[in-house]
Image: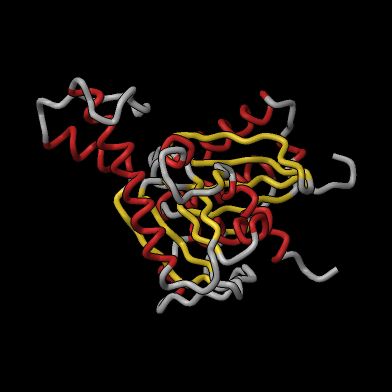
Amino acid sequence: MDNVKTILVVDVGNTNIVLGVYAGENLLAHWRLSTKRQWTADEFGILLKQLLLDRGLKASDIQAAVVSSVVPPLNTTVDQACRHYFGVPPLLVGPGVKTGMPIRYENPREVGADRIVNAIAAQERYGRPLILVDFGTATTFCAISTRGEYLGGIIAPGISISCEALFERAAKLPRVELVRPPTIIGRNTVQSIQSGIIYGYAGLVDAIVRRMRTEMEGTPRVVATGGLAELIAQETETVEVVDPLLTLLGLRLVYERNLPPA
């Protein structure tokens, strides 16, 4: 596609796979799929080809691919799909890949690839210092210093995990749609559960962010991302920006930082 390199970016999470296609800095298309650990390389590759066709793109348009994954069983699946269906060996974010961000964790290898990718994107787009909240399978908090270092963070059970535990352990409670109830004080069981989940997590976010700020220099900006970010963030007092596609930007930046010198 002209002289601009077209890149497939893929983030494999425990609950969702988020992927997109960049032409230079322009995000042409993006999708969010449910993660299926039983996918074969053929199933995943054929699905990706169809998604591209639906947006007027061809497999031959893809010139490079970059992948972050916290689901090791799918790493080979995605790698083989990229090689066979798009003819490109993907860059897998992990040890040895240049990120441009110093990691101050005691063991940097313990930090999930998705957390690093999100932190890179947030710093690029919003500056520093930063607190990044990701509403994924786990609800994670990442601290980026005034010097652009990944300081560490917090991992809490995710919203979906908490809901599943509640519904499985309390047999009489119904499964509910995650939407904002009309009042904080629920007038029925469904509203009461919705209020507990949404306002409970909003309170969790605010409490943790305020405590994190006491251990950080400067005045960190608070950015939220992830599939449920918009729903919860609007009920918080501390989240300033919601950016649900940060991971895709971060993957593109990692790819660019690992290009060979011109």
Residue 64 placed where, x, y %? 71, 51
Is residue 171 visible to the viewer in this orientation of the structure? Answer: yes
The C terminus - image quarter: bottom right
Residue at 31 percent of width and 54 percent of height: 156
| Image quadrant where residue 2 sits | top right
What's the image's color scheme? secondary structure
The answer to whether residue 36 is left or right of residue 115 is left
Residue at 38 percent of width and 39 percent of height: 38
Residue 236 placed where, x, y %? 42, 44
The answer to whether residue 117 is left or right of residue 106 is right
The residue positioned farthest toward the right in the image shown: 2
The answer to whether residue 204 is left or right of residue 81 is left
Q: Nearer the viewer, residue 53 or 34?
A: 34
Residue 63 placed where, x, y %? 75, 47
Residue 166 placed where, x, y %? 18, 37
72 w.r.t. 175: above or below: below
| Image quadrant where residue 57 sits | top right
The answer to whether residue 32 is left or right of residue 182 is right
The N terminus - image quarter: top right
